[in-house]
Amino acid sequence: MERVVAGNWKMHHGPSATRAFFRDFQPDLGAAPPTLIVFPPALSLAAAVESRGGRPEVALGVQNLHWEPKGAFTGEISASMALEAGARYALVGHSERRHIFGETDEHVARKVRSAALEGLTPVICVGETLDERRAGRVDEVVLRQLHSALEGLSETPGKRFLVAYEPVWAIGTGETATPEDASAAHGTLRRALHAALGAEWAQRVPLLYGGSVKPENARGLLEADDVDGVLVGGASLDPASFAAIAEAAL
Ligand code: PEP
């Protein structure tokens, strides 16, 4: 299974900080590195394209997009614009988009559709809040979010995508799910992919864990069953700590 280490910079690192990051990002990954993806702010994408050169190869993505290809949508960017600017991946349904900006499952499905149709690989984010976890609703919530997002892929069968399980209570809080919590949710997601798309495909979709991943806890999480990679927020801003996390995926 493909190993993936992705960094979501959120609203951090303008163009000059982006150049400095790639100058200093020098992980020691040998001949079989994990897939590395960085999601800079859209305004820093061009700087990332210019400065990410050399080894290891780092793919780029956008943190959000609009589902329409163009139009009167002030402040938005489309999948085709992101692709033209050098993005190959799109984060869709990040919990900050859902909870701060009111994105619904239906919006997420439309964004997944647009990303896939235009040629970006969607990274579908799902995860429960603390109240939902306390109410024993983890499976119900992540399965609802997953199935709704998969509807966005109905016109692009065979299109590669990734799923990131990011429990909302663990994002930016310093609280990390245990490897067992991550495995349990990932197992649920894997079984759902199996039921929806078949065994072979279910084994091909990388399942990433996200939520306060740091160099100190990355290895334990990456060794957990059904955890194929990590989506890292805060710790991906620093080149040395993101490099250490990438090395933990070897
Ligand atoms: C994220 O933003 O996707 C994330 C997981 O953030 P953090 O690692 O800072 O919790």
Image (cartoon, rainbow, N blue to C red):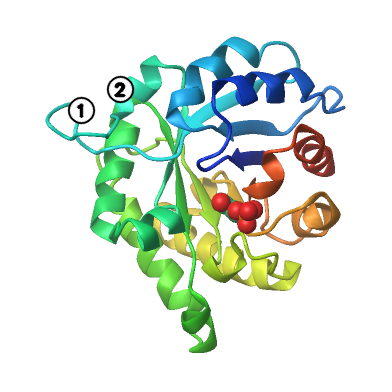
- The residues tagged by marks 2 and 1 sit, at their Cα atoms, a distance apart of 7 Å
Q: Quadrant of residue 4?
A: top right
Going by the numbered disc 1, the residue's amino acid type is: Pro
**Is 69 placed above or below 94 here?**
above
Q: Residue at x 81, y 58 (%)?
A: 217
Left or right placement of residue 116 versus residue 233 in this view: left
Question: Which numbered disc flags the more N-terminal residue, 2 or 1?
Answer: 1
Query: Is 41 situated above or below 146?
Result: above
User: Is residue 38 something that shows in the picture?
Assistant: yes
Image quadrant holding the C terminus, namely top right
Please state the horizontal and vertical placement of residue 29, each as a whole percent of the image. Answer: 84, 28
Structural crowding at the residue carrying mark 1, measured as other residues with C-alpha within 10 Å and reported as few (<14), some (14–19) or many (≥20): some
Element at label 1:
loop
Q: Which residue is mark 2?
A: 80
Which residue is located at x 38 percent, y 40 percent? 64
Q: Quadrant of residue 34?
A: top right
Pick the quarter of the image with the N terminus: top right
Q: Is mark 2 within 8 Å of ligand 1?
A: no
**Residue type, mark 2 in image:** Ser
134 versus 48 height, above or below: below
Dot 2, crowdedness within 10 Å: few (<14), some or many (≥20)?
many
Q: Which residue extends farthest left? A: 72
Residue at the bottom extreme of this rendering: 135
Circle 2/circle 1 CB separation < 8 Å: yes
148 vs 131, left or right, is: left
Instruction: Identify the residue at image location x=71%, y=55%.
Output: 213
- Along the line of sight, which residue is nearer the eye, 172 or 111? 172
Q: Is residue 72 left or right of residue 246?
A: left
Total label count?
2
Q: Which residue is mark 1?
A: 69
Residue 230 visible? The answer is no
Q: Between 199 and 123, which is closer to the camera in this rendering?
A: 123
